[in-house]
Amino acid sequence: MFGINLRYRFPVIGGCIGGALGGVAVYMTNLAALGFGTTVVPGIALADPAGNGYVNYVIAHGIAIAGGFLMTLVLGNFMDKTPEETVSGS
């Protein structure tokens, strides 16, 4: 994390935006949990099955992962630019 993500800044920002997009998906689908525990694959057991909870859980994770990936790519194109070197004519 410290060698790549914090050095370039945009992977951390892109990941946070992707997590926020996943959180919006959770909020919009009224996804609830039956308890506390780990997330991602084992966490699907904690999703409330009422109202397509399992499907919404997988969709929210897909949105978070895809959103983080895409935002990292987009931000990388803008933030990783090096200043153009000026050519001095002598």
Image (spheres, rainbow, N blue to C red):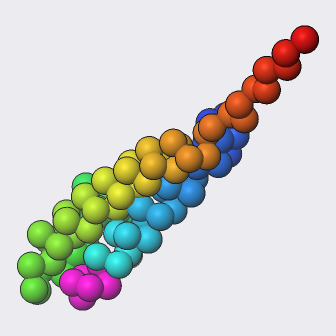
The image quadrant that residue 25 belongs to is bottom left
31 and 47: which is toward the camera: 31
Q: Residue at x 56, y 57 (%)?
A: 13
* Residue 65 seen anywhere in this rendered image of the structure: no
Quick check: 10 left or right of 50?
Answer: right
Q: Residue at x 19, y 65 (%)?
A: 59
* Residue 85 seen anywhere in this rendered image of the structure: yes
Horizontal and vertical percent position of residue 5: 61, 43
Horizontal and vertical percent position of residue 44: 22, 65
Give the main secondary structure of the magenta stretch: loop
Q: Residue at x 10, y 86 (%)?
A: 51
Quick check: 39 left or right of 89?
Answer: left
61 lies above or below 72: below
The residue lying furthest to the right in this view is: 90
- Which stretch appears magenta? 26-34
85 and 71: which is toward the camera: 85
Quick check: 1 left or right of 32?
Answer: right
83 lies above or below 53: above
Horizontal and vertical percent position of residue 35: 32, 79
The residue lying furthest to the top in this view is: 90
Query: What quarter of the picture does the C terminus occupy?
Result: top right
- Whether residue 82 appears in magenta in the rendering, the answer is no
12 and 42: which is toward the camera: 12
Horizontal and vertical percent position of residue 6: 67, 45
